[in-house]
Image (tube, rainbow, N blue to C red):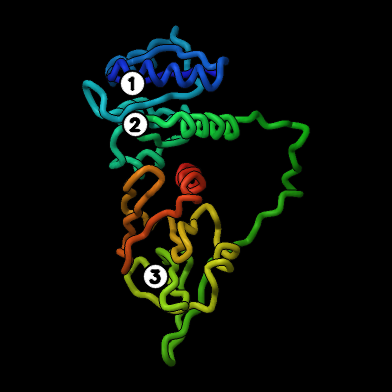
Amino acid sequence: MKVLIIEDEELSAERLENMLLGIDRDIHVLAIIPSVFETITYFQNPTNIQPDLIFLDIHLEDDNGFHIVESLNLMIPIIFTTAFDDYMLKAFKTHSIDYLLKPINPLELQASILKFKKLNIPADPKMSVPANEISVEKYKDRFLVTAGSRIFTFKTSEIAYFTIEERATFLRLFDGRHFAVEYSLEKLTQLLDPADFFRVNRTFLISINAIKDIHTISAGKLKIELAPAASQEVFVSSERITEFKSWLGR
């Protein structure tokens, strides 16, 4: 596996390189580059070897690391490494594998490498399925709700999240209105497209489009800001964090 490390802190770069070699001796670090300018120059040189995976710090010595992605329109998988959680949502909207906070935990780094390998397993042509035999799973695209004597119908795309309040399930629309629904969160996870909705804890099932921001509160604890805002703080359950990150970067 060919890896490029983009990091302006020499000690951090050396530590990351040593951890990578400790995880997999087949990893080959092509270069350690400290700046946006030098990285862009590296990719613009046709004689340089292209990496399979990039480790990218966000705050570099001359600019923001996202400038590299935007300038080159990079489609190479990226694992972001940073001391700040402010850019987590933006990172997962790029071609990213994971978002690791410094100091990098070796176990989290190992999990990120395994995730990269799983996502980049070459397809076996012998296992391909003819197009006319592929079945498309149908997910719920409308909800019917009642409020007093009135009946409403909403597209699933209009729903920001579902939540449990006083033992009842409610949906909250992006326009702020909310209505009770006759489904449990368990049932809703089966009815909704998992590419669009994720159950972050026991009481919230959220749309990816409702995420306003994500904050790391402590090791293994994420807080989500939703739009429209929820009536209570929303945290990702610790046992769901790895799956949640995978969902964000899908």
Question: How far from the left and from the top, in percent, is residue 126?
Answer: 78, 32
Q: Is mark 3 on a helix, strand or loop?
A: strand
Total marks drawn?
Answer: 3
Local crowd size for mark 1, using a 10 Å CA cut-off: few (<14), some (14–19), many (≥20): some
Question: How far from the left and from the top, in percent, is residue 125?
Answer: 74, 31
Residue at horizontal 44 percent and vertical 74 percent from the top:
170
Query: Depth-wise, is mark 2 or mark 3 nearer the camera?
Result: 2
Q: Indicate the amino acid at tag 1.
A: Ser
Determine which residue is flagged by label 3: 172
Q: Earlier in the sequence, mark 1 or mark 2?
A: 1
Q: Which mark identifies residue 12?
A: 1
Report the Cα–Cα distance between label 2 and label 3: 36 Å
**Disc 1 + disc 2, Cβ < 8 Å:** yes
Q: What element carries label 1?
A: helix
Q: Quadrant of residue 89?
A: top left
Residue at horizontal 40 percent and vertical 12 percent from the top:
31
Determine which residue is flagged by label 2: 102
**Disc 2 + disc 3, Cβ < 8 Å:** no
Q: Nearer the viewer, residue 184 or 51?
A: 184
Residue at horizontal 65 percent and vertical 29 percent from the top:
122
Q: Which of marks 3 and 1 is nearer the N terminus?
A: 1
Q: Does residue 75 appear to the left or right of 8 in the view shown?
A: right
Query: Depth-wise, is mark 3 or mark 1 nearer the camera?
Result: 1
Q: Indicate the amino acid at tag 2.
A: Lys
Residue extending farthest bottom: 149
Local crowd size for mark 2, using a 10 Å CA cut-off: few (<14), some (14–19), many (≥20): few
Residue 202 vs 13, above or below: the answer is below
Question: How far from the left and from the top, in percent, is residue 20?
Answer: 48, 20
